[in-house]
Image (cartoon, helix red, strand yellow):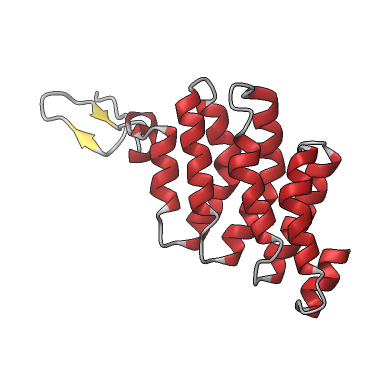
Amino acid sequence: MSLIVGVDDCSSESDVIVVPSALDFVSQDDMLTPLGRLDKYAASENVFNRQMVARSLLDTLREVCDDERECIAVLERISRLADDSEPTVRAELMEQVPHIALFCQENRPAIPYAFSKYLLPIVVRYLADQNNQVRKTSQAALLALLEQELIERFDVETKVCPVLVELTAPDSNDEVKTEAVA
């Protein structure tokens, strides 16, 4: 009597059929480092993949948080992702910024400039983004950052206020002006 385990791999020397387990297969992504995975999907032509990268940035930071160089590398990739041409990717990134900023403050005191150097410039730039969804998401992120006291007073005075003053100038777009005042 033969023992049938499966149908995928049949050996002629025995009556046992062996079926490889799903655990026997290692995906290519599992072989990549966290930064390698981030780079692979950030460079994808598929918008959904790039949105997923934005959503997974905090998880990636958590994976590499013991290595200061890798944390800085993730922050640099965030800056590159901020240049994405797709508004949904930029808006998704902006939704993650307050969470990433809080994580950086709590877990990387060795990189005190992480927020000011890498994240705040993106928030400030997106306040004047051409896409309404990106602008509104950046405004919400800015409010969350202010409420959580994650922005230093110096940064508010030197980086945020000048942009808000510019956005509310008499010659600026009325829609953007109304949003900036709100």
Q: Residue at x 38, y 34 (%)?
A: 30
x, y percent for residue 59: 57, 35
x, y percent for residue 47: 50, 62
Q: Residue at x 80, y 63 (%)?
A: 165
Front residue of 54 and 156: 156
* Residue 58, quarter of picture: top right
Q: Quadrant of the N terminus?
A: top left
Front residue of 8 and 73: 73
Q: Residue furthest right?
A: 182
Seen in the picture, residue 81 relative to 113 is either above or below; the reply is below
State the count of labels.
0
Q: Residue furthest left?
A: 13
20 horizontally vs 82: left or right: left
Front residue of 80 and 121: 121
19 horizontally vs 48: left or right: left
Seen in the picture, residue 6 relative to 48 is either above or below; the reply is above
x, y percent for residue 15: 19, 26
* Residue 16, quarter of picture: top left
1 horizontally vs 161: left or right: left
